[in-house]
Amino acid sequence: MTDKNFVLIEGRLGSDPEIRTTSNGTQVTTISVATRRSWKQKDALEWTEETTWHRVVCWGSKARALEAIGRKGKTVIVTGRIQTRKFEKEGEVREIREVVADSLSILNSIKRETLPDDETLNSQPIEDEIPF
């Protein structure tokens, strides 16, 4: 059996993406994506809602494209892998988990805007009238 590290998230951007450049010249952006789930307890009258925030890292052309067309509140679909990394801040070792994006698509009410290197989520707009 092969181990898998794959994640798919559909949610909303928490803020406008901001691009940074690493010391070796690679461009990167880190975004927050909110996902919600709702449920109704067995004997409850009201629905309960929970929001989870996901930290997503986009590199290179995905980072540039996301900065150009991504806006707070837009719905995104992200596929990638979960990464855990450690860093030191103020003398304390900290650990963070984030999703490293392999592909990312931005959805809007008219069409899907697919970022570079994403072949699996491409789609064409659907015509209003279907000839028969």
Image (spheres, rainbow, N blue to C red):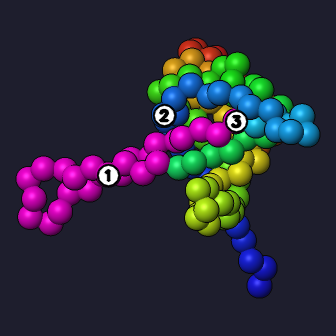
Q: Which residue is mark 2?
A: 14
Q: Which residue is mark 1?
A: 50
Chief SS of the magenta region: strand
Query: In which image quadrant can residue 40 be found?
Result: bottom left
Camera-nearest label, 2 or 1: 2
Q: Position of residue 111 (x, y in %)?
A: 62, 21
Who's the residue at 71% across and 51% down the image? Answer: 100
Instruction: Name the kind of residue labelled 3 in the image.
Output: Thr
Instruction: Name the kind of residue labelled 2 in the image.
Output: Gly
In the rendered image, the vertical position of residue 100 relative to residue 1, given as above or below:
above
Q: Which residues are magenta?
A: 29-53
Mark 3 touching mark 2, by CB under 8 A? no
Q: Which residue is mark 3?
A: 29
Query: If the image is split into quadrants, where does the N terminus sit?
Result: bottom right
Find the residue positioned furthest to the bottom. Answer: 1
Secondary structure under badge 1? strand
